[in-house]
């Protein structure tokens, strides 16, 4: 699939794998809990275009793709969710430091960690951190709404470094 801005999407059989992101390779993987645009969708009036289809069985193994493209990368599965009532300063500092290409995913991940610990968590510190990182209000609202609606599928953040006292 060709995207309206010249990118490509490849679609594979669905799986229960988690979403993934390799920013150095401009590669995103959407699976359980993820969504993508496809024809007849349009962005800025430009359509998504089907290039070709191939009938093949099997799903994409995201772990194998990651191992191939970034063999040095060790996927950590930190669980830095604050205990109920604990402030979100460490998550907010991490979100504020996210660069373009990872801000939205980082905010979504951090919001999910906060909501895992306390379903009634006040996410305003994360929203403020996302603003500092350069994310727009509309995207912040959509991302936090998605996390609140139960879209808790991202269990790790690729570049998250837990602070002292966080569990890895």
Image (spheres, rainbow, N blue to C red):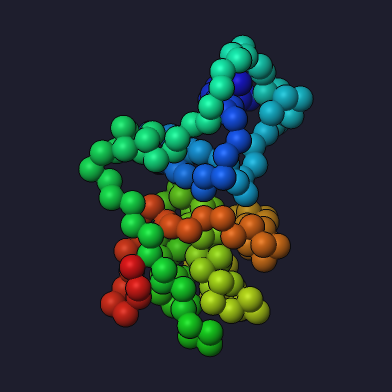
Question: As drawn, which residue projects farthest toward the bottom?
Answer: 85
Q: Report how many numbered discs are placed on residues in the image.
A: 0
Residue shown at the point (59%, 30%) measured from the top left: 13
| The C terminus lies in quadrant | bottom left
Q: Nearer the viewer, residue 99 or 61?
A: 61
Would residue 56 be found to the left or right of residue 102 on screen?
right
Asked if residue 113 is positioned above or below residue 65 in the image, the reply reads below
Q: Nearer the viewer, residue 81 or 144?
A: 81
Residue shown at the point (31%, 73%) measured from the top left: 163
Residue 148 at x, y = what percent?
Answer: 67, 66
Residue 38 at x, y = what percent?
Answer: 69, 28
Residue shown at the point (47%, 44%) measured from the top left: 20
Question: As drawn, which residue projects farthest toward the right?
Answer: 40
Would residue 37 be found to the left or right of residue 70 on screen?
right
| The N terminus lies in quadrant | top right
Asked if residue 56 is positioned above or below residue 127 in the image, the reply reads above
Asked if residue 79 is positioned above or below residue 89 in the image, the reply reads above
Question: As drawn, which residue projects farthest toward the front?
Answer: 57
Residue 37 at x, y = what percent?
Answer: 67, 33
**To which quarter of the image does residue 21 belong?**
top left
The answer to whether residue 112 is visible is yes
Q: Nearer the viewer, residue 35 or 12?
A: 12
Residue 155 at x, y = what percent?
Answer: 48, 58
Q: Nearer the viewer, residue 95 or 118?
A: 118
Residue shown at the point (44%, 38%) measured from the top left: 62
The answer to whether residue 9 is visible is no
């Amino acid at each position: 699939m060709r995207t309206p801005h010249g990118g490509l999407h490849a679609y594979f059989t669905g799986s229960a794998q988690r979403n993934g992101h390799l920013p150095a390779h401009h590669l995103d993987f959407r699976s359980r809990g993820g969504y993508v645009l496809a024809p007849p969708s349009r962005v800025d009036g430009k359509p998504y275009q089907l290039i070709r289809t191939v009938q093949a069985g099997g799903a994409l193994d995201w772990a194998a793709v990651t191992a191939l493209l970034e063999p040095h990368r060790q996927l950590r599965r930190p669980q830095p969710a604050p205990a109920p009532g604990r402030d979100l300063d460490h998550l907010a500092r991490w979100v504020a430091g996210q660069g373009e290409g990872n801000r939205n995913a980082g905010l979504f991940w951090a919001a999910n960690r906060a909501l895992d610990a306390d379903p009634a968590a006040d996410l305003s510190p994360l929203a403020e951190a996302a603003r500092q990182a350069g994310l727009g209000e509309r995207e912040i609202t959509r991302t936090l709404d998605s996390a609140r609606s139960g879209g808790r599928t991202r269990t790790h953040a690729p570049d998250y470094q837990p602070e002292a006292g966080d569990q890895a």
